[in-house]
Image: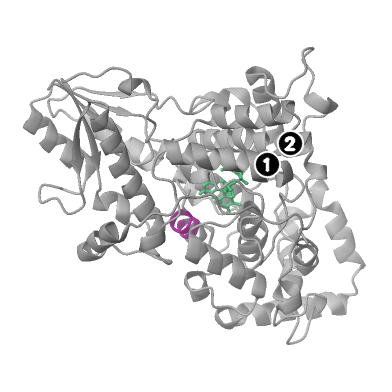
Amino acid sequence: AHTLRLVLGDQLDPLHPWFEAVDAGVVYTLMEVRQETDYVLHHAQKILAIFAAMRDFARHLREGGHRVRYVALDDSSNRHDIPANLVALAAHYGVRHIEWQNPDEWRLDQQLQNWAAQDHGYPAKAVDSAHFLTGRHDMAAIFKGRKQWLMEHFYRQQRRRLGLLMTPDGQPEGGQWNFDADNRKPWRGTPPEPPDARPVHDHSALWAVLQRSGVASMGEAQADQVRWPVNRAEALALLDAFITHALPHFGDFEDAISERAPRLFHSLLSFALNVKMLRPLEVVQRAEAAYRAGAAPLAAVEGFIRQIIGWREYVRGIYWAHMPGYDTRNALQHERPLPAWFWSGDTKMRCLQQAIGQSLRTAHAHHIQRLMVIGNFALLAGLDPQALHRWYLGVYIDAFEWVELPNTLGMSQWADGGLIATKPYVSSAAYLQRMGDSCSSCAYRAKEKTGPSACPFNALYWDFFARHEGRLRGNPRLALVYRQLDRLPGADVQALREQAQTHLNRLETL
Ligand code: FAD
């Protein structure tokens, strides 16, 4: 063989140009390494789903006539370190070149680049993963010289450039770029949540290998019924089901939370997208086609498309423009450790118990659970954003640092000092009561601000703004909050702050 090509676990795109022609001189390698299972404590389903999909991808490549060397976790020759495996395989096959697709995580990118820079006798080349709609470094150019990097600015550019939801004369469809204001209904049981269209896989054998190897994990493995797609065909079926059954209601209930409907009308496509089984453009084109065919309303389709061509590409751009260093930002200097119930769901605050419990059971929570329940609480309570980042990076099926980090540190925790979010995403119990349905069966009372049964979100909310007044009062988007705070009698503010302190002192047992 003349060339060894590395395929990473989040590069499972059968449509990549690499695979267009079969060349007997090229050996593809996929490897299950401790380096990747161990850099953070992952959800069991995340490890299972990625390894299972890698195995399926190797099978698919072999069926297509390609040469593949699959390095399994328990292979005796596995060095559990990507460069070390590459060197061994390169020698074994006698190749002259080593190639990989640009990794999306800074950590891996650095590791491979540093290794390539050493003199080990194998010229290395990195190619594009051919997945994203924008280049790694486009963002820095788009926002050159701007203090705030607003998503909306980027999003409109992408809509124009890609010609999505545009009228023939170059205007946004429906006369508006963004229909977010229409996408804020609570869900009270109708329309029903569509059936779960995901496949069911028995990964028990793989789970046994992980356990024998001593790979640590969190959450429930449910190894005999893992519900994440293992290949593009399954991901396409999931996309079909979403377009038909969920997209029409995606917009209306995009911000809703319900104990009775963990997915609501979300797509559950993030895993398939992030491991590159699906291409972002094909996904949004399907959504646009549903709108053009009259099968889904504009507000739903626009909202969905915005998440993918807007937010998803935007956070990636932020990540590459600000790494290294972005991961250590902590603008509000929050340092409190995460309470143990982040790994058990065992808290009396019902909304958190539900959102964290669901995350541990399924490796998924939808955006509002991540942002307005878990993230909201973490920010109000002043939890350490780096520890929180490691939790999010581990627990979610779709968590890869390029997308998880800006969402957690930037959007959710305001730890970047407002680069992404124009104001901290926090709320008191009133919002959770309006958008969700956990408050009615919670041990705490949403309407009470102080006292033993008061919902902790209330006092923590006011304490957050009082505590960070120096940093936040000048923000025009928070003028209303500070006017409200100013109108509260001093004794009330005092009582709220003392109550907040009481909550914080017993965080573990809240
Ligand atoms: P849908 O609601 O159906 O949305 C469709 C697609 O849009 C998603 O599959 C995803 O690809 C994209 N998308 C939506 N919102 C975002 C966003 N804010 N940023 C980037 N892409 C987005 N998403 C991840 O893919 N990986 C993560 O590790 C991740 N961590 C997050 C951490 C926090 C604190 C928050 C607030 C959000 C995070 N998100 C992350 C974004 C979002 O919550 C998930 O993409 C979404 O819940 C995945 O479920 P879905 O496929 O059903 O999404």
The amino acid sitting under disc 1 is Leu
Q: Is residue 437 visible?
A: yes
Residue lying at 46% horizontally and 59% vertically, measured from the top left: 395
The residue singled out by tag 1 in the image is: 247
Q: Secondary structure at mark 1?
A: helix
Nearer to the camera, 261 or 6: 261
Tell me where the magenta segment starts and ends, as one range. Answer: 390-396
Indicate the quadrant where residue 145 lies.
top right
Q: State the CA–CA distance, disc 1 to disc 2.
A: 6 Å
The residue singled out by tag 2 in the image is: 296
> What main secondary structure does the magenta stretch of the protein show?
helix
Residue lying at 59% horizontally and 52% vertically, measured from the top left: 415
Q: Which mark is residue 409?
A: none
Which quarter of the rendered picture does the C terminus lie within?
Answer: bottom right
Q: Position of residue 50 (x, y in %)?
A: 36, 48
Indicate the quadrant where residue 440 lies.
bottom right
Q: Secondary structure at mark 2?
A: loop
Q: Position of residue 248 (x, y in %)?
A: 72, 41
Q: Position of residue 444 (x, y in %)?
A: 72, 81
From this view, report whether residue 376 is shown above or below residue 145: below
